Image: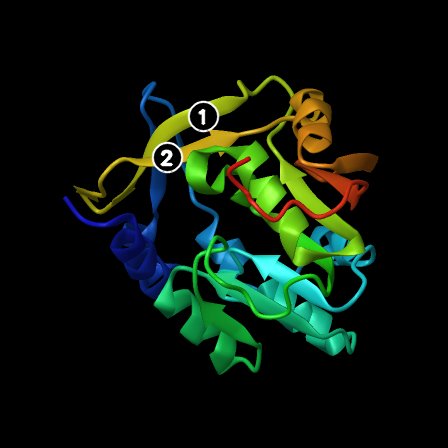
């Protein structure tokens, strides 16, 4: 078995070819393709409409190859991407974006100064615990900071789960992931000190805008 980051990196370098299709398989047997072609493309109309709500400076959590970073740069908005994948960060930097290889739970530059954080492309699932993740992001934001988050479609079962990546007959180790839908968002947001300001649908994707309401939570494990 391979590390998930290895499968992800291979998929990024092979996207566009038939064998480059990365599948996310969950422990319950369900599976969905990873949208690598979208990640590698320029921001589309839906992405741009979400970024209309972003106030700089912006922290893009799980930035991937950086299409949101590039779109923000074209708007003149300062943004920094954070991703565990060195390949993804290299791709983002190669097109002029600012990005670092790190976990969001590592020490992050600019703590307490980010006015907007992005948690798009399913990245609410990072670490398998959305409440812990939102608390960590809250600790990085300014006192009036906001979070733009992409949610799973209505009817999807929310909660923590195990997932793995599959590519051309190979598969990764299982790792912790999570799903969160709009109906489950309010309780998680409130527990992390956020208020839900808006939620909307863009094409076949679902989003919400959250604002930090409580003092920053310095210990994400609380």
Image quadrant where residue 90 sits: bottom left
Quadrant for the N terminus, please. top left
User: Disc 1 marks which residue?
Assistant: 160
Q: Alpha-carbon neighbours of circle 2 within 10 Å: few (<14), some, or many (≥20)? A: some
Residue 2 got which mark?
none
The residue that appears at 70% across and 26% down in the rendered structure is 182
Q: Position of residue 69 (x, y in %)?
A: 63, 68
Q: Using the rendered image of the protein, determine whether residue 57 is visible from the camera's viewpoint.
A: yes
The residue that appears at 77% across and 50% down in the rendered structure is 146
Marks 2 and 1 close (CB-CB < 8 Å): yes
Task: Note whether 63 is above or below 29 in the view shown.
Answer: below
Judging depth in this view, the residue of 38 and 222 nearest the camera is 222
Q: Is residue 200 left or right of residue 66?
A: right
Question: Does dot 2 land on a helix, a strand or a loop?
Answer: strand
Image quadrant where residue 36 sits: bottom left
Q: Alpha-carbon neighbours of circle 1 within 10 Å: few (<14), some, or many (≥20)? A: some
**Badge count:** 2
Q: Where is residue 200 in the image (x, y as percent from the top left)?
A: 79, 36
Quadrant for the C terminus, please. top right
User: Disc 2 marks which residue?
Assistant: 176
Judging depth in this view, the residue of 176 and 32 nearest the camera is 176
Q: In this view, does 73 lie to the left or right of 105?
A: right
Inter-mark Cα distance, 2 to 1: 7 Å
Judging depth in this view, the residue of 195 and 99 nearest the camera is 195
Question: Does dot 1 land on a helix, a strand or a loop?
Answer: strand
The residue that appears at 80% across and 54% down in the rendered structure is 143
Image quadrant where residue 57 sits: bottom right
Q: In this view, does 7 lie to the left or right of 47?
A: left
- Which is nearer the N-term, disc 2 or disc 1? 1
Task: Note whether 95 is above or below 3 in the view shown.
Answer: below
């Amino acid at each position: 078995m391979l590390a998930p980051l290895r499968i992800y990196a291979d998929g990024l370098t092979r996207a566009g070819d038939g064998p480059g299709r990365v599948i996310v398989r969950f422990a319950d047997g369900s599976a969905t393709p990873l949208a690598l072609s979208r990640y590698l493309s320029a921001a589309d109309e839906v992405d741009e409409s979400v970024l209309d709500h972003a106030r700089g400076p912006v922290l893009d959590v799980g930035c991937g190859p950086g299409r949101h970073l590039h779109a923000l740069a074209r708007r003149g908005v300062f943004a920094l991407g954070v991703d565990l994948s060195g390949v993804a960060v290299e791709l983002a930097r190669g097109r002029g974006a600012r990005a670092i290889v790190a976990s969001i739970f590592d020490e992050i530059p600019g703590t307490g100064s980010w006015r907007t954080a992005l948690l798009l492309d399913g990245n609410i699932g990072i670490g398998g615990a959305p409440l812990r993740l939102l608390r960590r992001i809250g600790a990085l934001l300014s006192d009036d900071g906001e979070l733009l988050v992409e949610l799973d479609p209505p009817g999807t079962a929310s909660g923590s789960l195990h997932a793995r990546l599959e590519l051309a007959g190979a598969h990764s180790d299982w790792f912790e992931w999570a799903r969160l839908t709009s109906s489950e968002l309010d309780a998680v947001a409130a527990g992390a000190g956020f208020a839900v300001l808006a939620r909307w649908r863009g094409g076949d994707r679902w989003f919400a805008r959250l604002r930090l309401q409580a003092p920053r939570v310095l210990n994400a494990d609380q």
